[in-house]
Image (cartoon, grey):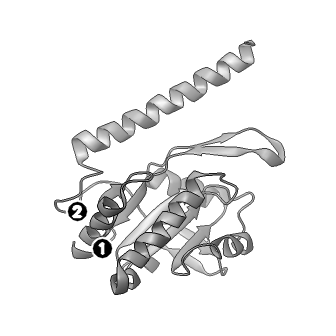
Amino acid sequence: MSSRTRMIAYAVWGATVLAVAVLALGYTQFGWFASSGPALTSSIGGPFTLVDQNGRAVTEKTFLGKPTAYFFGYTHCPDACPTTLMDMTDRLNALGPDGDKFNVVFISVDPERDTSALLKLYLESFDPRITAATGTPEAIASVIKAFHVYVRKVGEGDGYTFDHSTAVYLMNAKGDLVTLIDYQEARDAAIAKMRRALAS
């Protein structure tokens, strides 16, 4: 193993340990993944200004008044993003009429490639109630920081990817974090959490 490869391996390992530590702290100290209880009073989330798949400006205030599920990813993601968006499509349908009372927002961590037009095309494979948002690199960096999302670009050129956290952030109608849905969490548990957000 070359020294450069070893350094990259150490960096990946360190980032992974950090992400796991943050999630473990949230789980044990703040109940981020709890399926019951009141909304959490955390510092997750905050003001942002982005554009949706139709080129319209959206802010955090756009989604107030309904519970909102935020997920961070990118259209070139090979697995976690399409899987989660398919899961959210299924969960919205499982909620029946209550699915219309939910916002689902997919925020791109790849503003370099994810234009509004590409996001609109990408969303054609998922529930039409899902909104996608992108923005300037600075705006994306700001919203990533506000939600404490782990994101790391991997590689260069056209084939780069991202390592990124995969939890869904469930906020109530007032914009407070209620809980998180883990990646590929059991269907019934995830839907129960969405109903909890509706009731909070």
- Residue placed under numbered mark 2 in the picture: 39
Q: Is residue 77 left or right of residue 46?
A: right
Q: Residue 2 versus residue 43: which sits nearer the camera?
A: 2
Give the residue drawn at x 28%, y 54%: 42
Earlier in the chain: of badge 1 and badge 2, it is: 2
Mark 2 lies on a secondary structure that is loop
| Image quadrant containing the C terminus | bottom left
- Residue 199 visible, this angle: yes
- Residue 177 visible, this angle: no
| Image quadrant containing the N terminus | top right
Query: Horizontal and vertical percent for residue 18?
Result: 45, 32
Q: Is residue 170 left or right of residue 151?
A: left
Residue type (three-letter) at the residue carrying disc 1 = Lys
Query: Horizontal and vertical percent for residue 136?
Result: 67, 62
Query: Horizontal and vertical percent for residue 198?
Result: 27, 75
**Labels 1 and 2 touching (C-beta < 8 A):** yes
Q: Quadrant of residue 58?
A: bottom right
| Image vertical order of residue 165 relative to residue 105, above or below | above
**Picture disc at residue 48:** none
Q: Residue 4 versus residue 79: which sits nearer the camera?
A: 79
Q: Is residue 187 left or right of residue 27?
A: right
| Image vertical order of residue 44 relative to residue 124, above or below | above
- Residue placed under numbered mark 1 in the picture: 174
Front: mark 1 or 2? 2
Q: Is residue 33 left or right of residue 3?
A: left
Give the residue drawn at x 49%, y 72%: 89
Residue type (three-letter) at the residue carrying disc 2 = Ala
| Image vertical order of residue 162 relative to residue 199, above or below | above
Query: Horizontal and vertical percent for residue 124?
Result: 65, 76
